Every structure is written in C-alpha cells, then in structure tokens.
C-alpha cells in the first residue's frame, strides 16, 4: 500500500526533530489533542514521526514545534513555522507573536519578516501600513529573490502617498527580473499606474 505524501510542514517538523533528538518536556497538553501529560504525548508524536510521519495532525505538528522551540531556545525556525500554522488556523494575532518571537532570535530571518508583514496586511484589511512596508522592504533588501516582498513594500509607499518612492522601488524590483520572467507581465500594470502618478526618472 502506498502511503500518503507528506506535507511540507510535516517534512519540516521531521527534519527539526531529527536535528534535536528528544529533549525535556515542560508543558501539559494542547487544544485539540487528548488530555494526557505532554511527556507521554510527545513520546507518541516522536514515535509517529519515526514510523508514520505522514499521519501527523495539525495539533501534533504544532505541539512538536512548540517543544522544539523549548529545546532550541535560540532557533528562529520553530517560531516561524508555529506562526505559519497559526496563520493557517485563522489565528492572526497569535501568528504575529510567533513571527515576532522568530525575529527576536534572528532579525534577518527573511521568511519571518515576510510572514509578519503579510499578517499585518491581513489585520489591516489589505492596507500595507508603515510597519508592514518596512518589513517587506527589509526582506527584499536581504534577499532580492523575494520579488513579492519588494512589490508590497512599493505598494506601502504608494498607499502612504509617496508615489515617487513607490515608483522608484517598483522600477528597481522590475529591473532585476529576467526578460523572460512571467512576473513581468503581472507587475507591469502596477508599475504603469504608479509611474503615471510619479515623476519619471532621468
């Protein structure tokens, strides 16, 4: 019988668990899981990771990540992936705190920068406020393959009324895209609209 494919999150949890091994257990239970001491639950989860990782539930994945965060207190990755799960569970305020925890451990963790900025946009009904724009800009500065982050940062400048800055940022992002990159077609209308409202560069 063929087993179901593992999700990306399950594979990440498995990798993290293999990296740290078994640590101490400090917490008692999680919502959505059976009512039993966390040491017993964690033992069951680790056994499942060893024998059938594709069967991990969302609650078990979250519990394992939280334990990994305890076992590796300086690592940003568990907090980032906790944020991803919480965001997927429509818990944006909790996701914000998780992403912030990741960034306290590594303020240059690009996925956490993008994750936090994206949740702030969701909480602001789609508006790219100053904090979100700053986070997107920082992510793009650190990794210019984060094209969407660069464009969101430009949109933040536009929504703040600085059309010249927005156009400059969009042109810079657009210029780095390869000629055959399909994103050129998606982003060019945005660039055209903002460019009409901003002074043209010499």
Image (tube, rainbow, N blue to C red):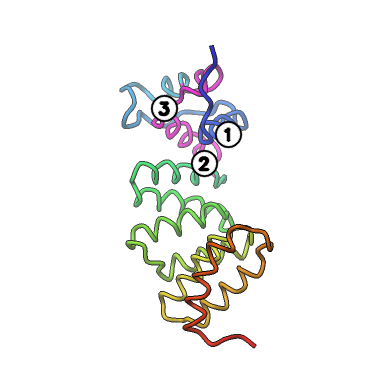
Residue at point 48%, 77% (across, down): 194
User: Residues in magenta?
Assistant: 45-73
Would residue 59 be counted in the magenta stretch? yes
Q: Which of the marked residues, 2 or 3, is nearer the chain's N terminus?
A: 3
| 10 Å crowding of disc 3: few (<14), some (14-19), many (20+) | some
- Which label was assigned to residue 57? 3
Q: Which of the marked residues, 3 or 1, is nearer the chain's N terminus?
A: 1
Q: Which of the marked residues, 1 or 2, is nearer the chain's N terminus?
A: 1
Badge 3 element? loop
Q: In front: 126, or 138?
A: 126
* Disc 1 + disc 2, Cβ < 8 Å: yes
Q: Position of residue 10 (x, y in %)?
A: 51, 31
Alpha carbon separation for disc pair 2 and 3: 17 Å
Reading the image, the residue beneath label 1 is 16
Reading the image, the residue beneath label 2 is 78
Badge 1 element? helix
Q: In front: 145, or 193?
A: 193
Looking at the image, is 135 positioned above or below residue 86? below
| 10 Å crowding of disc 1: few (<14), some (14-19), many (20+) | some
Residue at point 53%, 35% (across, down): 8
Alpha carbon separation for disc pair 1 and 2: 8 Å
Badge 2 element? helix
Chief secondary structure of the magenta span?
A: helix
């Amino acid at each position: 019988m063929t087993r179901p494919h593992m999700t990306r999150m399950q594979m990440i949890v498995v990798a993290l668990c293999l990296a740290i091994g078994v640590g101490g257990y400090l917490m008692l239970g999680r919502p959505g899981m059976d009512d039993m001491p966390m040491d017993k639950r964690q033992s069951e989860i680790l056994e499942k990771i060893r024998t059938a990782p594709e069967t991990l539930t969302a609650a078990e994945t979250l519990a394992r990540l939280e334990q990994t965060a305890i076992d590796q207190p300086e690592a940003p990755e568990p907090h980032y992936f906790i944020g991803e799960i919480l965001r997927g569970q429509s818990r944006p305020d909790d996701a914000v705190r998780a992403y912030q925890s990741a960034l306290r451990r590594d303020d240059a963790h690009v996925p956490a920068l993008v994750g936090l900025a994206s949740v702030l946009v969701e909480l602001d009904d789609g508006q790219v406020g100053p904090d979100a724009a700053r986070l997107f800009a920082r992510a793009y500065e650190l990794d210019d393959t984060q094209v969407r982050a660069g464009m969101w940062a430009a949109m933040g400048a536009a929504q703040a009324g600085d059309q010249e800055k927005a156009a400059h940022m969009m042109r810079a992002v657009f210029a780095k895209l390869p000629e055959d990159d399909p994103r050129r077609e998606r982003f060019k209308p945005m660039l055209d609209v903002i460019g009409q409202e901003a002074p043209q560069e010499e």
